[in-house]
Image: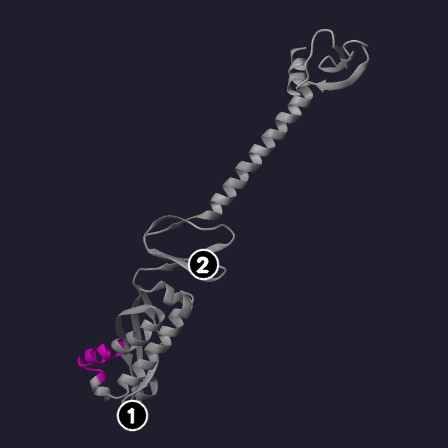
Amino acid sequence: RDTCLDILRLLDIKCSKKNYDIFYHPKHKERATIFLKNFKSNDIIVGLNISGSSQEKKIFDDDVKKIITGSIVVIAVLAFFSIFIVKEVNQAIVLQFGDPKRIISKPGLNFKIPFIQNVVFLDKRILNLDTPPEEVIASDQKRLIVDAFARFQIIDPLKFYISVGNERVARSRLATIINSRIRNVLGQQELQTLLSEDRTKQMSLIQEGVNNEAQNFGIKIVDVRIKRADLPQANSCLL
């Protein structure tokens, strides 16, 4: 009865004990109908059905739980795709549809727009590069097999990403540049000079030339060295 009166008050209907009746369903006591009557003629003006069954309340509670659970899942998914961590050994580029938007060099927790932005991680440590052995013809027309290696570092991530895209392409480009520079510099020297301690000066020239070209890729060449220099098999037999 109190619930019925509360509903009538919400509907802004003024009631007294004489102008309404409450009829309860014989099988479902939680259901009832409020009959509003004309105060004088006792004619029924309108009937309002109300229900307070526990089953319907349970269904309502289940729907609320589903909505809350779904909301939590959506928030968790958005958080998963929004948060990323930059490690101390990495630097990151935030891309939006392939277009660089942010450069992050400091380690820590960062955020991006889910499903619209993605992150490319680049190593900021000094990296090693082993170049394939290269045959060099000295100025006295003698041949030498040179096996070199280099150490490099990505110092400009934006230029690096725009020019080469990733580390695999960068290694390939650097190997080509180093071997080309080795042929150019060592090809102007005699074989005896290349096998002597004087080749340190030649390696400095090689490193300087490679570094000038590597700067176009956002890369700094830390060192270039020759691991070994051997005569070709045919030359060795003649000697």
Of residues 107 and 185, which is closer to you in this image?
107
Of residues 239 and 159, which is closer to you in this image?
159
Q: Main secondary structure of the magenta part?
A: helix
Dividing the picture into quarters, in which one does residue 141 lie?
A: bottom left
Spatial separation of the CA atoms under disc 1 and disc 2: 51 Å
Q: Position of residue 47 (x, y in %)?
A: 77, 18
In front of the other: label 1 or label 2?
Answer: 2
Assign a secondary structure to mark 1.
loop
Q: Position of residue 222 (x, y in %)?
A: 26, 68
The three-letter amino acid code for the residue at tag 2 is Leu
At horizontal 30% and vertical 79% (from top left) the residue drawn is: 146
Q: Is residue 199 magenta?
A: yes
Mark number for residue 40?
Answer: none
Dividing the picture into quarters, in which one does residue 5 lie?
A: top right
Assign a secondary structure to mark 2.
strand
Alpha-carbon neighbours of circle 2 within 10 Å: few (<14), some, or many (≥20)?
Answer: some
Q: Is 11 rendered above or below residue 134?
A: above
Dividing the picture into quarters, in which one does residue 119 lie?
A: bottom left
Can residue 71 be seen? Answer: yes
> Could you tell me which quadrant the C terminus lies in?
bottom left
Mark number for residue 95?
Answer: 2
At horizontal 27% and vertical 84% (from top left) the residue drawn is: 185
At horizontal 65% and vertical 23% (from top left) the residue drawn is: 58
Q: Is 180 rendered above or below residue 97?
A: below
- The first of marks 1 and 2 along the sequence is 2
- Tell which residue pokes out farthest to the top in this image: 17
Q: Which residues are magenta?
A: 194-207
The three-letter amino acid code for the residue at tag 1 is Gln
Q: Position of residue 168 (x, y in %)?
A: 41, 67
Q: Which residue is mark 1?
A: 141
Of residues 114 and 131, which is closer to you in this image?
114
